[in-house]
């Protein structure tokens, strides 16, 4: 099994590609969040969105869910559009775009 940091980097790459294909701003992903005690933080700056995710002692599905929700929240999506994007992003990490092409 791959290390968590390699899985994180691969998921970040796949989600970045998928976000761009959906016409969204692709965030930068990093770990861990600066603020202790948080599983996910989002920073909006003029240079873009940064989503920081805690990896340690968390189920991989929770990490992916936080990454996906970071894209949705970072782009200010809600309602049907947010749901459509979530489905597309889950598909991107379930079937990485590099393998689907």
Image (cartoon, rainbow, N blue to C red):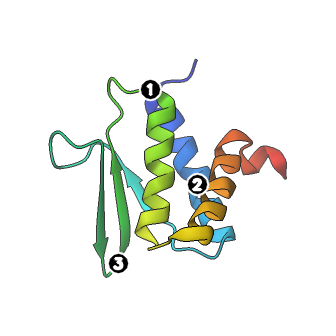
Q: Give the foreground label among 2 and 1.
A: 1
Kindly identify the residue that appears in the image at 44 percent across and 33 percent down.
Answer: 5
**From mark 3 to mark 1, how far is it between C-alphas?**
31 Å
Query: As displayed, is residue 5 above or below residue 67?
Result: above
Kindly identify the residue that appears in the image at 71 percent across and 45 percent down.
Answer: 96
Q: Secondary structure at mark 3?
A: loop
Q: Secondary structure at mark 1?
A: loop
- Residue position marked by numbered label 2 in the rendering: 15
Kindly identify the residue that appears in the image at 49 percent across and 63 percent down.
Answer: 72
**From mark 2 to mark 1, how far is it between C-alphas?**
18 Å
Kindly identify the residue that appears in the image at 51 percent across and 33 percent down.
Answer: 61
- Residue position marked by numbered label 1 in the rendering: 59
**From mark 2 to mark 3, how far is it between C-alphas?**
19 Å
Q: Label 3: few (<14), some or many (≥20) within 10 Å?
A: few
Q: Which mark is residue 47?
A: 3
Sequence-wise first label, 2 or 1: 2
Q: Which mark is residue 79?
A: none
């Amino acid at each position: 099994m791959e290390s968590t940091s390699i899985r994180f980097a691969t998921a970040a790459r796949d989600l970045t590609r998928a976000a761009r294909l959906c016409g969204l701003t692709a965030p930068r992903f990093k770990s861990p969040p600066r603020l202790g005690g948080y599983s996910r933080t989002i920073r909006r700056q003029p240079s873009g969105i940064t989503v920081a995710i805690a990896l340690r002692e968390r189920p991989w599905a929770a990490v992916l869910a936080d990454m996906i929700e970071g894209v949705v929240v970072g782009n200010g999506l809600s309602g049907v559009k947010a749901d459509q994007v979530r489905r597309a992003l889950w598909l991107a990490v379930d079937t990485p775009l590099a393998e689907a092409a």
